[in-house]
Amino acid sequence: DAKTTQPNSMESNEEEPVHLPCNHSTISGTDYIHWYRQLPSQGPEYVIHGLTSNVNNRMASLAIAEDRKSSTLILHRATLRDAAVYYCILTRAGNQFYFGTGTSLTVIP
Amino acid sequence: SQTIHQWPATLVQPVGSPLSLECTVEGTSNPNLYWYRQAAGRGLQLLFYSVGIGQISSEVPQNLSASRPQDRQFILSSKKLLLSDSGFYLCAWAQGLAHTDTQYFGPGTRLTVL
């Protein structure tokens, strides 16, 4: 099974960049890397996803290692609204999903 | 635009009682539908998914079942709840193959079994 590993928690000062790491050493060639975030008592919200190349959208950037065994979600300027649990997820054909334990991000004003 | 609804928002049930949680999606047709459970302080566990009416795939054997009586309706049920069924239940939808596509989650149902 493809497994992801993330730090349990991280802190960031407001308006500074945040780099959230994820290890997925058993990733296979066709697995996609998705990131979602979840606020307390809410459903997860999509952040970004990618396969091999780095990706950017209005919320964040995703940097994928050349060997694809790790990736980093980058929030360019953390705001208080970015405080959430961030999940790194590998998705595989056949509706197989492998969720990490998530990183709880605290943003310090 | 698409929206996903879940109800009830919270539920407290005694052990051994039945369960029915409902999820509906608006603004799209033929979505893939998913049920997840999240235990306190844990990640998401995929329980069931459906690619069409009457088509249910189970990921984790347990005393829960799922049904899809209509294209945009997904129901999670149990005949007899266990204490271990407590958790946060999330419904999600995706258009097309979810491993390449984005999943959109509902607001969730908080279930407490006493």
Image (cartoon, rainbow, N blue to C red):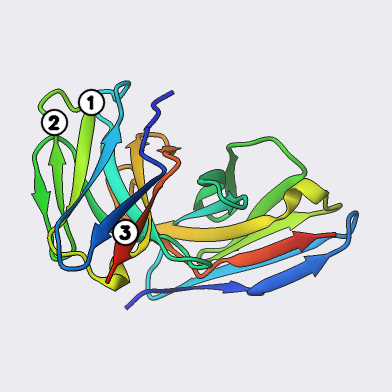
Q: Chain of mark 2?
A: A
Which residue sits at x=30%, y=28%?
A24
Q: Is residue A11 above or below residue A101?
A: below
- Horizontal and vertical percent position of residue A68: 18, 28
Task: Describe the element under mark 1 as helix, strand or loop.
Answer: loop
- Horizontal and vertical percent position of residue A56: 10, 54
Which residue sits at x=33%, y=42%?
B99
Lower sequence index among marks 1 and 3: 3
Q: Is residue B23 visible?
A: yes
Residue identifier under label 1: A69
Residue identifier under label 3: A46
User: Is mark 1 in CB contact (under 8 Å) with mark 2?
Assistant: yes
Q: Is residue B46 above or below residue A107?
A: above
Residue lying furthest bottom: B1
**Residue A65 got which mark?**
2
Q: Is residue B30 visible?
A: no
Lower sequence index among marks 3 and 2: 3
Disc 1 marks which amino acid?
A: Lys
Disc 2 marks which amino acid?
A: Ala
Residue neighbourhood size for the residue with mark 2, other residues' Cα within 10 Å, grouped as few (<14), some (14–19), many (≥20)? some
Q: Which quarter of the rendered picture does the C terminus of chain B lie within?
A: bottom right
Q: Chain of mark 3?
A: A
